[in-house]
Every structure is written in structure tokens, then in C-alpha cells.
Amino acid sequence: MATSVREFHIGLYLEHLEEASFLYTQRLALLKDNEIFWRDLDPFESRLEAHIDALIVGGDAALKQCIDKLEDGDAGIIFAAVSVFCRHRRSDLLALALKQIDHTDAEHIAALTDALKWELPLDWAVFVERAIARGDEKLTDALATVSGYRRLPIAQTLLTALAKAPTQALVAALGRLRSVDAVAPLEACIASGAPAMKSAALLSLLQIGSTDALQAQYLNAQVEKWPRTLLALGGSASATAVLNDIVQAGKATPECLLALGLLGDLSAMKTLYQCLQNPDCARAAALGLNWATGAHLYEDEFEAEEVQEDELFENELLAWREKRQPPMRLDGQLFGKRVQRLSTNPESWKQWLSDHRERFAHTGSRYRDGLLYSPAALLGCLRDPRSDRRLRRLTGLELVSRYACELPFEPDMPVCQQILALQDIEHWAAHEAAHFEPGAWYAGGQPQ
């Protein structure tokens, strides 16, 4: 029990800090859930913002609690504390945080990175640049990620760091900064890197507008998985043929089918439809079809509750272990819930495609969400509250790689920032619409 006003305030600040930590962790979990729509995060982010704001209003007393809890705090505490330090413009306290954080803990580094992605004052870019130039291995990747996310103009420093010790974070940052000086070093990463590095480097080249390195991957994609999504992000109509051949050869993977859906080429629709009959690929095929057609053929589906052995009665546990018989409700039904999922029923899709065939009359054209592929169609996907995070991430990259849109967009931005970013993209799309033929193939802003 508080015995003074000061202790009462300290208790409040600690509560704000703990609540901010919880909400940050909850937000991370929601971001990973493809069943959660992007606007659903707004209430959590608004509550998180309210607690961060309360810590700012608390002044020095709240700041002290952030400092005291930082060293032994969890990832959420680190996120909240670093956010407060940035808003107070206390570079000395950020330096303290960089020293105290456990650099071997991936969650702690991720929390530091997230806080700086949201809150880093732009005039601190010089400090970020100096830290990367010093070559601190413990911080370089985190600060490179922040540099790319915030589009800090430090490409040359990142290139120097890449030459010393190539990492995926440095490669990804150079792609976001769209530095043409990075083309040759990134091509070198493709030539000598592991699959994950090759993928990151090729993606960055597509963002910069360089498609030469992609041409070499058309044949490679037939034997290796890593280039397939990238063919969808920057490839020509030939990419559809390559991916179709892979599926027809019995080598279909979810990534391959989603890549076909992303391409939106009418010649891929038959392939995706056929894959609905394969239980291992049906969900990915339905999602790919939905991305291209915008059918939104949802149906109710029962989702059984996962069995938790420690919650079962003795007789239920015995039945489960011996016969794999799950517990039942009093009415004899399984525990679970009804959910809406995309239909994988071939007959439902056959009927829908037949009923709407007039919408897809432009042979050789590309489609997204039932519309001829264009910046406006991509913007619609980003705004659609039903679009999952995978599609929104890829669509944001398509705006860069296909149409050379330089406006920043990230699917893990706070919702309020995403709305502003989409408004900017809308103005850009309206201005650039006349330069792009709907349904046509583009890469780097140029026709293919």
C-alpha cells in the first residue's frame, strides 16, 4: 500500500510500464497470426500508445522507473523504455540501453529494433551511421534494419559494412534505400551466398529496379525453392510458365502456388484449380486463386479444439491415449468453434469461375483481386481489411519492384501510420496511373 503521493505515482508508472510490455508482446503474437486482419491491431496499439504517453507525461519520475527496470526487464520492458528515451530525446539513455541489453537474446534485440523503428528521431541518423561504421557486430544488424525501415540516407556506410561482413540485414536495408551503388555488391551476394542470403539480395535488387539477376533464376527455380516467390515479384509472363511446369511435374509447394496467385496470370488459374483436389496443397491453391480473382469464397468450417492432456479427466485421458478419442461435450459433439475459411471445394470454385468468366476476358493480362493488375488494384489489396499479412507484405514489395514506387510502406507499421502511408500511395497512384497500362507486365517501372 502506498504511503505517500510519490510512492503512489511510482506504482502507477510501474503499472504503465508493465502494461506496455504486455501489449507489445500481445501485438507481436497477433502479427504472426494470419487469421488476424491488419486493422484488428489498432485497439491494442492505441492502448500501448496510451501507456507510453503516460510514461512520457510522468517526466523524470517515470523515466527513472524505465531506467531501473531496463537491465533485468523482458523484451516488452525494453521496447517501452527505449521508446520513452527516444521521445524524451535522451541519446545518453539510449546509449545506456545499448550497453545493458543482452545482445545474445534475440527477443531483446528485436524489441530494441522495433522501438527504434517507431521512435528514432531522424536527426539521430548520424549516431546510427557512426555506430554502424564502428562495426559493432552486436548492433550492426539491428541498426541496419532501422536504417532501412526509416529510409535513413546512409547507403554508403551500409555498403562499407557489407563489404566487411555481409549480412541479410545489411542487404535488406540497401534494398529499401534503393541504392544503385549496391547493385554489384548484391549480385556478388547472390553468387556466393546461402539460399537465404541469395533471396534477400535478389529481393533488394528488384526493389532497386535491377532485374538482370532475376533472369538467371528462371532455370534455377525448377530445382531450388528460394527464387520462386521472387519470380512472382519481378518476373515476366515466362515466370508463370516456369511455375506451372513445376506444379505439373508434381513438385507443387505452398510457396509455388501462392507465387502463381501473386502473378495473377490467367494461364495459372487452371493449375491452381487442379491443385484444389490435392489435400496437401488445397489451402494454398485456394488462397492463390483468391488473390487473383477476389472471389472471397468463404464457408463455415468446424475447427476442433486442440486436446490438452493436463486438462482431461482420468477417463478422458485414458480414452485419448489408448484410442485417440478426444473429449466430448454433453451433447456428444467435439469441443471447438465454427470459423470462416476460404473454400477448397473444387465444385464451388468451378461454379464461381463460370459465373464470373466475363470479368477475366483479357487474355495475357494479369489480375489482382478480380481487377486488372495496376497500382490502384495493389492499393486496394493493401487497404482491404480481409487481406492477410503475407499478401500485404508482398503487395507492398510489388509496388516498389513493379512500379518503382518509392513511398515507404511496411505491413508491421502501426495501423495509424499505415493509414497515412496508404493515403500517400493513393496520391502517387492517381498521379502515375496514366503511365501504366492495366493488366500489363512491368518491372522497375518499365514494360516487360
Image: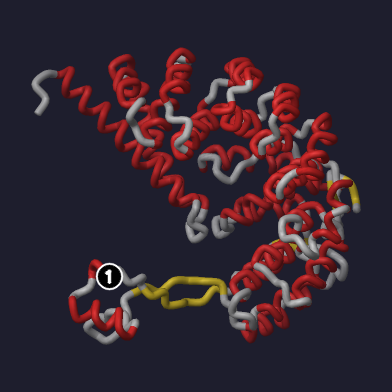
Name the image quarter holding residue 177: top right
Residue 244 location (% of width, % of height): 79, 71
Residue 322 location (% of width, % of height): 30, 83
Residue 294 location (% of width, % of height): 66, 67
Q: Residue at x 71, y 65 (%)?
A: 256
Foreground: 194 or 290?
A: 194
According to the image, label 1 marks what residue?
A: 309
- Number of numbered discs visible in the structure rendering: 1
Q: Secondary structure at mark 1?
A: helix
| Vertical relation: 403 (above or below) 141 | below
| Vertical relation: 292 (above or below) 232 | below
| Vertical relation: 359 (above or below) 376 | below
Location of the N terminus by quadrant is top left
Is residue 43 at all visible to an observer of this figure?
yes
Q: Residue at x 78, y 64 (%)?
A: 223
- Which amino acid, mark 1? Glu
Is residue 430 at all visible to an observer of this figure?
no
Q: Residue at x 71, y 74 (%)?
A: 272
Q: Is residue 198 left or right of residue 415?
A: right
Name the image quarter holding residue 152: top right
Foreground: 400 or 275?
A: 275
Residue 317 location (% of width, % of height): 24, 77
Local packing at callout 1 (Cα closer than 10 Å; few below 14, some 14-19, many 20+) is: some
Foreground: 366 or 70?
A: 70
Q: Residue at x 75, y 60 (%)?
A: 224
